Image (cartoon, helix red, strand yellow):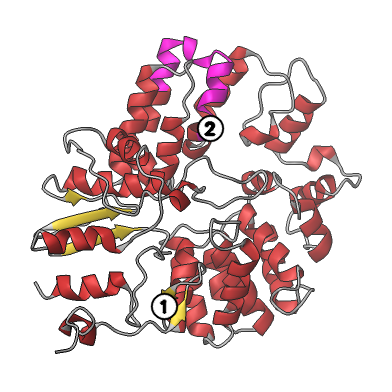
Amino acid sequence: MANPLLFRSLLRDAPLANASNQQGAAAFAFTPRHKLAQMVMTGCMNETFYASGQAQLNDVLATAKDLDDLFLAQLAIYGRERGMMKDMPALLTAILAARGSALLPVVFTRVINNGRMLRNFVQMLRSGVTGRRSLGTRPKKLVQRWLQNASEERLLQASVGNAPSLADIVKMVHPRPQAAWQEAFFAWLIGKPCDKAQLPEKTRALLAFREGDMGAALPDVSFLLLTNAPLSREQWAQLAQRMSWQTLRMNLNTLARHDVFENATLAASVAQRLADRAQVRQSWVYPYQLLSAWSNLQSGVPQVIREALAQAMEYALENIPPFRGNVVVCPDVSGSMKSSITGYRKGATSKIRCVDVAGLIAAAVLRNHPQARVLPFECDVVDVRLDARQSVMHNAQKLAAVGGGGTNCSAPLRRLLNERARVDLVIMVSDNESWVDKSRHGSTATMECWIELKKR
């Protein structure tokens, strides 16, 4: 009789691996649409543990090359509006521009919705990676229209940032001013002489403040336009009350360093804003960004602010759908998951790691579904006891503190098989480079375990 270990019926059902992952291990190829959608919703185009930023860019360009304009347009809009992504939707918009697609105006309007996205689009299109180095007639007109239709506040916000700066873009496209204030503003922006009396109110106030007018009030403009000047504690307190929700979240330690929270009334006001459900939902904040803010709070930040961020996290996770039956969450806590969630790039690397986000997802599911099982894994399942009554922040940090070995995605599935567990839903959070458990049978150990688990 043939060796039963080599000819299990299980193996007849497992599909054969037909690709290799970035680690060089056996994997399963997605369809081009599936592959591009995944890259748009998760890609960072920075240096990651397995793939470089250039490799990711090359992959996107090669995959998009054979896909139709309509799908690229839909994916760009979905990635921006539902995924809240930035670089990938901007890249797809630049690809459509390079193709001369008739869908570009619609996509541009919905994807390029702030100054950063405008700079991303122009940078990508002029870089040559999409096949052209000039903007071209239609993209140029779209950029002109964006500048002409933007309010003073939006233009001032867009003026923060470089490579290219908003001034560089104005010099490229030469927008035709639609009003006297625009003519003065564009001239001032690019360093040309202008009639300062024609500048809009906030811009005049900013100039007066920068010129050291002692009687000038703190202008109501973007926080980042003011930080080069020395500010008093009272002025920092004013900024704390004016900042957008996202800017406030990102600058809590800065405010603490300038003694803003020594005013208990102001600290309570800031906490109230941070914990406001409507503002949390409108801010497009990622839960991992809240985890980052909470984890990095310095000692000068009062407890009321910490509690407000924890409450904001609860609101940010309200979109978790209801799951039925037996739910198992498998967060990867291997060594590669210690990499930054955004990948590595000088000046743009998040302190939050992939393992922090994996722990956050597991803790969030557990919070809404207390009966769910959590099976963290590396080379094998790591036994960690979590309390569903604890905060999401607490459980996420507890999970992120364990692990560090190799990646064995089949380990939690094999645990479930050995226990003869009945499972209705498995959520696996991993960097998807399972190579410790490669199969000798043309499939992968993870796929083989998954096929058998689904038979239960």
Q: Residue at x 40, y 49 (%)?
A: 405
Q: Amino acid at mark 1?
A: His
Q: Which residues are magenta?
A: 250-269
Magenta highlight: main SS: helix
Q: Residue 6, percent across and down?
A: 23, 82
Q: What's the amino acid at mark 2?
A: Met
Residue 359 location in percent, x, y?
A: 33, 45
Left or right: 373 in relation to 434: left
252 or 345, which lies in front? 345
Residue behind mark 2: 243
User: Is residue 133 depicted above or below 398 in this figure?
Assistant: below
Q: Residue furthest right?
A: 193
Residue toward you, 36 or 139: 36
Between 140 and 391, the one lying in front of the other is 391
* Residue 322 visible in the snapshot: no
Residue 399, above or below 40: above
Q: In the image, residue 299 lies at what x, y percent?
A: 47, 17
What secondary structure is marked by label 2? loop
Please state the horizontal and vertical placement of residue 301, each as a whole percent of the image: 46, 19
Quadrant occupied by the N terminus: bottom left
The residue positioned 59% from the left and 84% from the top of the image is: 65
Where is mark 1, residue-wise? Answer: 34
Within 10 Å of disc 1 (Cα), the crowding (few <14, some 14-19, many 20+) is: few
In what element is the residue under mark 1? helix
| Residue drawn at x 66%, y 60% as measured from the top left | 120
Which tag, 1 or 2, sits closer to the chain's start? 1
Q: Residues within 10 Å of mark 2 (few under 14, many from 20)?
A: some
Left or right, residue 129 beside residue 439: right
Instruction: Give the quarter of the image for residue 63.
Output: bottom right
Q: Which mark is residue 434?
A: none
Residue 251: say if magenta: yes
